[in-house]
Image (cartoon, helix red, strand yellow):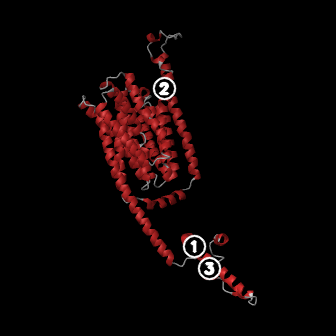
C-alpha cells in the first residue's frame, strides 16, 4: 500500500510542491535509492539484531514518512521523505523473508507465498483507497460549463472558491496517507509486542545451530539466484509497465482495451499468488519453479511470435502473469532446503530484484525509442525467460552436489560417532539412548535364556521327590549372565520381556 499509493496521488504531490508532474521524476529515483540502501543495511542488521525490533522500526519509519508527505511544500523535502520510505521498505522486504524462514523453517513454503500475496493485495487496495479519498473532489475540478448537465444546481464560484477548493482537496488527499500510515503504526505496535516477548539468546542459539547448514556451493548459489531474480523481476515490471503502450501501438487497441489487457496481467498475477498458498502445501518449491518457468517460456514464445493475433495476446498475457507470480517466493523457499539464508543473502536477493526493476525497464524504453517498429517488450520477455530457464538447472545441479556432499559427511560422522560410542565407557542409560538396536538383540538373548531356564527347571522337577527345591533357587540366574541391571536398565525392558514370555 505504501508503494502503490504514490501512483494515483502523484499529481496531488506535484501540486503541493508547485511543480509539474514531469518535473518531480527524481522522487522515484530517491525512493529507489533508499530502497537499495535499506535492503543492504537490513541484510547487515538482521544478522546481529532482533528481527521483530527491526521490522517494527522499519514500519514506524514508513509511518513517519507517510504522515509527513502530504504536508511537504518543498520538492527536496518530498524526495527525502520518499527516500526514508524506500529505505524502510527495503528493510521490511529483507526482514520479512528472513523472519518467515526462521519462523517456519522447511515448512515456510505456504507462509512465504502468503507473504508475497499480501504485496498484491496492498497494490490492489491502495489505488481504491486513494480513489475514494479523491473521488468526491473530481467533479469540482471540471469547468463550469461542463456541469450544466447535472441535475443538482451548483453555487456560483466566488473569488475565494479556488482557495477553498484547494484546501478541501488537500484534506481529502491527506486521508489516504493518514489511513495507510495509521495501519502501519498499528502493525508496528504488534511487532514491538513480539520483540518484548522474544529473547535474543534464542535467536543467537538458532543462528549457531544453522551455521553448519551452509552448503558447499553456498556463495555460487547466492550469486546465481541474484541473477535469477534480476531477470525475473525485471521482466515482470517491464511487461506490466509497457503492455499498455504495446497494445495501443502494435495491437491497435483503444485505451479501454489496452487498460483491460494490463489488468488481465496483474489480475492473473495476484490470483495465482493466492492459489499458490494452497499449492505450496502439497508441492515442492522446485516443482513450482519448474512449472512457472515452463509456463513463462511458453507464454513469452507465444507473445514474441504470435502477439499480432488478439487471442494469442490475451491468452499469452494471462498465462505469463500467472507464471510469473510464484517464482520469487518459491525461489527463496527452494534455496532454504539446501543452505541457510541469513540477512545478507536475503538482502542480495532483494537488491537483485530492485536492480532488475530499475535497469531492464530503462533499457527496454531506450531500445524501444531507437527501434520503434520492433516489439522490444515481447523479445525482452522471451530473452529473460530463456535466461531463467537456463539458470535454474545450473542452480539445481550445484544444490544437488552440495546436498550429496553433506549427506556423505553426515554418514561418515554418524559412523565415527558409533565407533567412539562402542569403545567408550558410557553408562547403561546413555547406551539405551544411542544404541536402541543393541537392546533389541539383548532382549532376544534373554528370552532364549529364559526358555532354557524353564526347561531346566521342568527337567529338575521330574528327577524325583528327593531333590530339594532350594537347590534350584540357589542356582545363579541366567539374567545375571546376560548383563541385565534391574536398576540401571531400560525402563520398559522387563515389561517387554514379560509380554514376550507370555506370548511364548
> 417 or 55: which is nearer to us?
417
Q: Residue furthest right?
A: 465
Residue 45 drawn above or below residue 66:
below
Please, what secondary structure does the residue beneath circle 3 have?
helix
| Label located before the other in sequence (2 or 3) | 2
Sort mark 1 into few (<14), some (14-19) or many (20+) by Cα contacts within 10 Å.
some
Sort mark 2 into few (<14), some (14-19) or many (20+) by Cα contacts within 10 Å.
some
Residue 375 drawn above or below residue 335:
above
Contact, mark 1 vs mark 3 (Cβ under 8 Å)? no
Residue 447 drawn above or below residue 306:
below
> 361 or 374: which is nearer to us?
374
Sort mark 3 into few (<14), some (14-19) or many (20+) by Cα contacts within 10 Å.
some
Alpha-carbon distance for marks 1 and 2?
73 Å
Location of residue 159 in the rendering, given as x and y in whole percent from the top left corner = 48, 14
Tell which tag, 1 or 2, sits nearer the viewer. 1
Alpha-carbon distance for marks 2 and 3?
87 Å
Image point (49%, 16%), residue name: 161
Location of residue 128 in the rendering, given as x and y in whole percent from the top left corner = 49, 28
Q: Which residue is mark 2?
A: 131
Location of residue 361 in the rendering, given as x and y in whole percent from the top left corner = 32, 36
Please, what secondary structure does the residue beneath circle 1 have?
helix
Contact, mark 1 vs mark 2 (Cβ under 8 Å)? no
Q: Which residue is mark 1?
A: 439
Tell which tag, 2 or 3, sits nearer the viewer. 3
Q: Which mark is residue 449?
A: 3
Amino acid at each position: 500500500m505504501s508503494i502503490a499509493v504514490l501512483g494515483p496521488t502523484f499529481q496531488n504531490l506535484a501540486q503541493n510542491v508547485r511543480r509539474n508532474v514531469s518535473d518531480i521524476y527524481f522522487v522515484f529515483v530517491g525512493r529507489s535509492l533508499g530502497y537499495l540502501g535499506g535492503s543492504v543495511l537490513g541484510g547487515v542488521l538482521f544478522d546481529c539484531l532482533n528481527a521483530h525490533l527491526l521490522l517494527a522500526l522499519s514500519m514506524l519509519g514508513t509511518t513517519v514518512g507517510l504522515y509527513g508527505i502530504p504536508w511537504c511544500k518543498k520538492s527536496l523535502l518530498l524526495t527525502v521523505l520518499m527516500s526514508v520510505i524506500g529505505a524502510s521498505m527495503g528493510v521490511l522486504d529483507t526482514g520479512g523473508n528472513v523472519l518467515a524462514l526462521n519462523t517456519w523453517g522447511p515448512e515456510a513454503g505456504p507462509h512465504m507465498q502468503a507473504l508475497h500475496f499480501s504485496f498484491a493485495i496492498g497494490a490492489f487496495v491502495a489505488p481504491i483507497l486513494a480513489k475514494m479519498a479523491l473521488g468526491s473532489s473530481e467533479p469540482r475540478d471540471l469547468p463550469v460549463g461542463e456541469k450544466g448537465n447535472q441535475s443538482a444546481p451548483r453555487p456560483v464560484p466566488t473569488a475565494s472558491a479556488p482557495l477553498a477548493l484547494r484546501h478541501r482537496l488537500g484534506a481529502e488527499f491527506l486521508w489516504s496517507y493518514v489511513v495507510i500510515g495509521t495501519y502501519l503504526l498499528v502493525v508496528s505496535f504488534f511487532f514491538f509486542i513480539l520483540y518484548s516477548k522474544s529473547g535474543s539468546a534464542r535467536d543467537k542459539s538458532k543462528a549457531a545451530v544453522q551455521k553448519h547448514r551452509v552448503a558447499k556451493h553456498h556463495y555460487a548459489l547466492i550469486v546465481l539466484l541474484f541473477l535469477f531474480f534480476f531477470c525475473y523481476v525485471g521482466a515482470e515490471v517491464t511487461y506490466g509497465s509497457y503492455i499498455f503502450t504495446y497494445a495501443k501501438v502494435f495491437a491497435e487497441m483503444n485505451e479501454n482495451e489496452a487498460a483491460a489487457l494490463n489488468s488481465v496481467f496483474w489480475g492473473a498475477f495476484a490470483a495465482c499468488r493466492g492459489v499458490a498458498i494452497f499449492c505450496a502445501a502439497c508441492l515442492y518449491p522446485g516443482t513450482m519453479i519448474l512449472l512457472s518457468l515452463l509456463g513463462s517460456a511458453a507464454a513469452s514464445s507465444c507473445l514474441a511470435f504470435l502477439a499480432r493475433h488478439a487471442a494469442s495476446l490475451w491468452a499469452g498475457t494471462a498465462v505469463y502473469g500467472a507464471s510469473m507470480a510464484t517464482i520469487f517466493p518459491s525461489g527463496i523457499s527452494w534455496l532454504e532446503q539446501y543452505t541457510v539464508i541469513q540477512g545478507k543473502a536475503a538482502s542480495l536477493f532483494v537488491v537483485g530484484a530492485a536492480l532488475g526493476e530499475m535497469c531492464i525497464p530503462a533499457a527496454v524504453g531506450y531500445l524501444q525509442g531507437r527501434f520503434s517498429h520492433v516489439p522490444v517488450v515481447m523479445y525482452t520477455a522471451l530473452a529473460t525467460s530463456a535466461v531463467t530457464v537456463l539458470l535454474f538447472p545450473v542452480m539445481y545441479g550445484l544444490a544437488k552436489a552440495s546436498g550429496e556432499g553433506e549427506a556423505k559427511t553426515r554418514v561418515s560422522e554418524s559412523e565415527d560417532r558409533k565407533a567412539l560410542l562402542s569403545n567408550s565407557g558410557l553408562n547403561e542409560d546413555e547406551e539405551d539412548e544411542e544404541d536402541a538396536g543393541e537392546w533389541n538383540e539383548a532382549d532376544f538373548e534373554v528370552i532364549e535364556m529364559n526358555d532354557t531356564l524353564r526347561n531346566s527347571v521342568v527337567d529338575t522337577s521330574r528327577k524325583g521327590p528327593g531333590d530339594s527345591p532350594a537347590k534350584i533357587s540357589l542356582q545363579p540366574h541366567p539374567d545375571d549372565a546376560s548383563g541385565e541391571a534391574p536398576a540401571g536398565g531400560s525402563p520398559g525392558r522387563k515389561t517387554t520381556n514379560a509380554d514376550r514370555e507370555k506370548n511364548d
